[in-house]
Image (cartoon, rainbow, N blue to C red):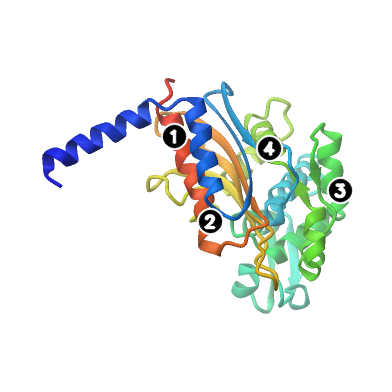
């Protein structure tokens, strides 16, 4: 291809992106999904709430580690009420560092440690630490406390029944910890805009800084976005069972655009017989389509 032809190709491609409509955006997402043997739930909200897209948005999907975001919000609520403190130190003994759970914390402190709640929250959310998750649930009284917190504050379609140990010991139990793509987006927006003052300023700044520091799932929402794009997100993964079915490959979050705007996006991939890379690529492709769509929108 000559330089002249390459330039023409780029111009035509740019025109196609700039001419994208809500209907063509939806078709693009559906094409990404239909090409794979998966069930996908998508909810996207941007352009100050003027643009929304939902596919299986009210379908229940297992959260897996996405629920650590919900747990963190419940913990921060108790901190705001004075029941706990971000600076409060918690002794973690070696016996607490369960060997069968994924835990960067255990890798760093194999013999135990004394850590602040803020550090445990960072491990749990940013690094999806399962031991940290269990410690936090123990501090606030268990999974039911998390579910009750969201119900009491008017949120629907959030079910938190089991901790990490329970759902990892029994494949079926992960389906009791569920949400919908729409609900995931609603919670992201409610706690980001914080119009109802559900979080103090300190707690609000803490959770969104921590979400932006997430290290897991780099090939999901962030996978095909321009380098250094800021994404505040939380991932979840089930792995595959002996039949080769993956129950959950998830990522929910906020993508911040260079034009000063942002969009909320929750993507849940379930009942997949595809491999791990393909499952993540579905999320990355959907995220890239959303990026291209909102980057063409006026401020």
The secondary structure type at the circle numbered 1 is: loop
Q: Is residue 168 above or below residue 197?
A: below
Residue 214 visible within the image: yes
- Label 3 neighbourhood size at 10 Å, few (<14), some (14-19), many (20+)? some
Nearest to the eye among marks 2 and 3: give it: 2
Q: Is residue 296 left or right of residue 198?
A: left
- The residue wearing badge 3 is 145
Observer-side mark, 2 or 1, equals: 2
Residue 246 occupies quadrant: bottom right
Percent coordinates x, y for residue 50 in the rendering: 57, 21
Please name the residue that numbered disc 2 is placed on.
Answer: 280
Q: Which residue is mark 4?
A: 57
Q: Secondary structure at mark 3?
A: helix
Residue 215 in view of the camera: no
N-terminal of the pair, mark 4 or mark 2, is 4
Instruction: Classify 85 as above or below 5.
Output: below
4 and 2 marks in contact (CB < 8 Å): no
Label 1: which residue? 257
- Whether residue 17 sits left or right of residue 247 in the image: it is left
Q: Position of residue 193 (x, y in %)?
A: 63, 29
How packed is label 4: few (under 14 Cα within 10 Å), some, or many (20 or more)?
Answer: many
Q: Earlier in the sequence, mark 1 or mark 3?
A: 3
Mark 4 or mark 1: whose residue is earlier in sequence: 4
Q: Residue drawn at (53%, 33%), measured in percent from left and top?
A: 26
Q: Are marks 2 and 3 in contact (CB under 8 Å)?
A: no
């Amino acid at each position: 291809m000559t330089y002249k032809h390459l330039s023409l190709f780029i111009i035509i491609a740019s025109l196609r992106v700039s001419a994208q409509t809500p209907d063509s955006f939806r078709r693009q997402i559906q094409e990404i999904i239909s090409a794979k043997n998966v069930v996908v739930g998508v909810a996207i909200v941007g352009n100050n709430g003027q643009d929304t897209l939902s596919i299986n948005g009210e379908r229940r999907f297992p959260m897996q580690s996405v629920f650590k975001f919900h747990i963190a919000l419940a913990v921060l609520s108790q901190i705001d009420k004075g029941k706990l403190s971000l600076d409060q130190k918690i002794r973690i003994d070696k016996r607490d560092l369960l060997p069968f759970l994924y835990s960067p914390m255990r890798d760093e402190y194999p013999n135990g440690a004394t850590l602040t709640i803020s550090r445990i929250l960072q491990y749990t959310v940013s690094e999806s630490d399962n031991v940290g998750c269990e410690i936090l649930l123990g501090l606030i009284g268990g999974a039911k406390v998390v579910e009750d917190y969201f119900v009491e504050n008017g949120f629907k379609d959030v079910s938190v029944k089991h901790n990490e140990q329970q759902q990892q010991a029994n494949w079926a139990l992960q389906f009791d910890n569920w949400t919908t793509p729409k609900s995931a987006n609603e919670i992201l927006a409610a706690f980001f805009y914080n119009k109802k003052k559900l979080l103090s300023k300190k707690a609000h700044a803490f959770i969104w800084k921590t979400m932006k520091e997430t290290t897991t799932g780099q090939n999901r929402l962030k996978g095909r976005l321009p380098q250094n794009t800021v994404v505040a997100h939380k991932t979840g993964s089930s792995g595959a069972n002996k039949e080769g079915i993956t129950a959950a490959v998830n990522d929910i979050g906020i993508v911040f655009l260079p034009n000063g705007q942002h969009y909320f996006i929750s993507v849940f991939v379930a009942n997949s017989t595809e491999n791990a890379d393909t499952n993540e690529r579905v999320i990355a492709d959907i995220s890239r389509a959303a990026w291209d769509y909102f980057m063409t929108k006026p401020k």
